[in-house]
Amino acid sequence: ETGVTQSPTHLIKTRGQQVTLRCSSQSGHNTVSWYQQALGQGPQFIFQYYREEENGRGNFPPRFSGLQFPNYSSELNVNALELDDSALYLCASSKETGVSEQYFGPGTRLTVT
Amino acid sequence: AQSVTQLGSHVSVSEGALVLLRCNYSSSVPPYLFWYVQYPNQGLQLLLKYTTGATLVKGINGFEAEFKKSETSFHLTKPSAHMSDAAEYFCAVSDYSGYSTLTFGKGTMLLVSP
């Protein structure tokens, strides 16, 4: 059984640019959640996708957007990058939304200069 | 709204000593509680979780935690620390209202000395 994978591992972008991060969910999982983990902080919920629809959103501006594809993989897009967007972005998949354990990928380290 | 407070950003123990990492939560509904571990440059791995039922929960790698509703606590313990336990530990809470999202504490770095 393949776990959650994320790409790329590391990324360096310039302020104002746009970035796309990718996540492949674990086999049999239809729900993907994205979290932002700033240095020295716990992960913060960005949004969740369930069966290709956004199912919930944390306190992040609209320039953070996402997609989920029919195979349940997902993308996180961030427009107009700011220095404070530098963080580890974690993807987690689960079998269903609601009461369901989340399995995390290794993350993408984004650095904005 | 939910929140998690982890007391102590760093905890140092000697190998073989008791590990105690503290977590207090705030939730308006009966919570589901979790402990995750994060090794350097890696994602999060679930150590254990409390949903319903028995308040003493056993997890992987010899860790356990006890849910105490009256104290709104979910402290993580391990009787004897091992060098390989050195990592960052996160406590998280979920109320599973509509969709599952985790609210994390700021984490506690566990340092283990020989």
Image (cartoon, rainbow, N blue to C red):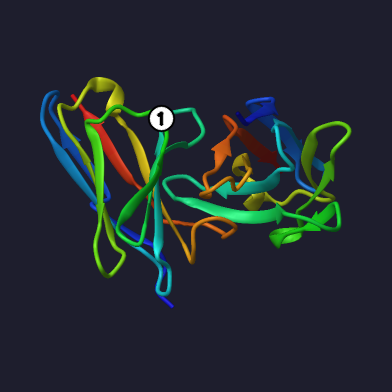
Q: Residue furthest front?
A: B98
Disc 1 target residue: A38
Q: Is residue A106 above or below residue B101?
A: below
Q: Nearer the viewer, residue B78 or A19?
A: A19
Left or right: A111 in relation to B40: left
Callout 1 secondary element = loop
Q: Is residue B47 above or below residue A83?
A: below
Q: Nearer the viewer, residue B71 or B58?
A: B71
- Judging from the image, mark 1 belongs to the subunit labelled A
Task: Estimate how packed mark 1 is, as few (under 14), some (14 to 19) or many (20 or more) residues with alpha carbons within 10 Å.
Answer: some
Q: Quadrant of the N terminus of chain B?
A: top right
Left or right: B41 in relation to B31: left
Q: Residue at x 62, y 41 (%)?
A: B89
Amino acid type, mark 1: Ala
Residue A89 at x, y percent in the picture: 35, 42
Q: Quadrant of the C terminus of chain B?
A: top right
Residue A44 at x, y percent in the picture: 46, 34
Residue B44 at x, y percent in the picture: 51, 50
